[in-house]
Image (cartoon, rainbow, N blue to C red):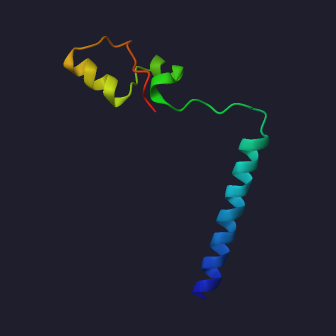
Amino acid sequence: MFWTIFILSMVILGIGLLLMSVQIIFGRRKSFPDYRIGHNSELRKRNIYCAKTEQRIIDGQSSEGDSCSSCI
């Protein structure tokens, strides 16, 4: 009983991952979105910065608009 549920759940999980990867690879959008905090314009509009920049702002070493370019 355990093995049938386990195998069934793995099959369903595998099908879901396969369908998501097909959507990513063959979707209309040809470029991957930029998820790095320092390079994402939507996050900058909402004043969300990376941890390094936040710490520099707290320490008073940089202005709020100064985003670090080495954030990964």
- Location of residue 14 (image quadrant): bottom right
Query: What residue is rendered at 65% in x and 77% in y?
Result: 7
Residue placed most toward the observer, 17 or 38: 38
Residue placed most toward the observer, 69 or 12: 69
Residue placed most toward the observer, 66 or 2: 66
31 with respect to 52 (left or right): right
Vertical side of 12 occupied by 26: above or below: above
x%, y% of residue 67? Answer: 40, 18
Residue sticking out furthest to the front: 70
Query: What residue is rendered at 53% in x and 32% in y?
Result: 35
x%, y% of residue 45? Answer: 47, 17
63 with respect to 60 (left or right): right
- Location of residue 57 (image quadrant): top left
46 with respect to 35 (left or right): left
The quarter of the picture where the N terminus appears is bottom right
Residue placed most toward the observer, 60 or 48: 60
13 with respect to 23 (left or right): left
Vertical side of 16 occupied by 8: above or below: below
x%, y% of residue 37? Answer: 46, 28
x%, y% of residue 31? Answer: 69, 30
Residue sticking out furthest to the left: 59
Vertical side of 17 occupied by 71: above or below: above
Query: What residue is rendered at 76% in x and 49% in y?
Result: 22
